[in-house]
Amino acid sequence: MPELAFELVDEAGFDEIPQPAQPGARCQTCDYWERIDGGRATPEAGAPDAGARATLKRQRLLAGRGVSGSYGMVAIRTDAVTRVAIGYAQFGPLSAYPRAQSIRDRYPQLPESPAPWVLTCLQVTPDADDRDDIGVRLLEAVCAELDGRGITAVEAYPERAADPWSPSPGPATVYEATGFERAAGDDRFPVYRRELTGETDADAWSGLLRASRADDEGDDWPLPLPPRRDPDDLFRLPPEKPKRPNPFGED
């Protein structure tokens, strides 16, 4: 009987991220959420920047691993002989996703505290028979992971579409089934939010430190934080910035 496991994205698992539902997109090179002018489309075959985009995406997903953990999780279906990635979620602080911040700026009624992390992508492969159920279980695993890191709230921005799995955040119904509530927006562009306990899991942090351990231990271990970086920044809203263009257009 196949089992479902949930694993944080690391260097080895990056290439396992399955293809999203949207035709022509590829999670390993997508920068839609990381840039206001980013896109989901896969670089054309032989494009000189294809490798660079994949490398940059990997670096972005692992950027916070030494401080707060990976920004991605994969759902893996396994049995005695096979291992198949069938789902993927991407998440992180608002500072990592300018497009999410731009969307959030449209809704001043959203609470500034506790500052949320955002879940930008929730995808399950179309060939999965129990797609919605897998999405719910993956989303629960993500929330449990963030709760263990001390995150106190998480938000997502699913878009209404004929195929609810086509937009990268996945269907609003999956969020509703996982304890999220609509905090702002309309049916087309809602904002869903879930409050977490924020009770840090000591075992999770121990695992994080082990994953971040240097290959050769010595005087440089534990690894120092990046200069001028306050780890509490991951739990604060970024400073207010000049108004950005409406990411949805003016229609």
Image: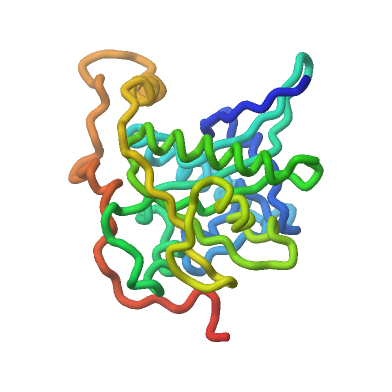
Count all numbered tags in the image, as a single digit: 0
Name the quarter where the C terminus is drawn: bottom right
| Residue drawn 59% across the image and 49% down it | 122
Q: Residue at x 52, y 32 (%)?
A: 8
Percent of width and height locating residue 212 = 37, 25
Residue 115 image offset from top left, x and y in percent: 30, 54
**Residue for point 25% across, 21% down:** 222
Residue 6: x percent and y percent? 58, 30
Q: Which residue is depicted at the point 26% across and 68% down?
A: 240
- Location of the N terminus by quadrant is top right
Q: Quadrant of residue 67?
A: top left
Q: Name the residue nearer the viewer: 171 or 58.
A: 171
Q: In the visual, does 183 lie left or right of 50?
A: left
Q: Nearer the viewer, residue 86 or 143?
A: 143
Q: Is residue 110 above or below residue 13?
A: below
On the image, which quarter does residue 41 sit in?
A: bottom right
Q: Is residue 43 left or right of 7 when viewed as pictured?
A: right
Q: How is the image coloured?
A: rainbow
User: Which x, y percent locates residue 55?
Assistant: 53, 43
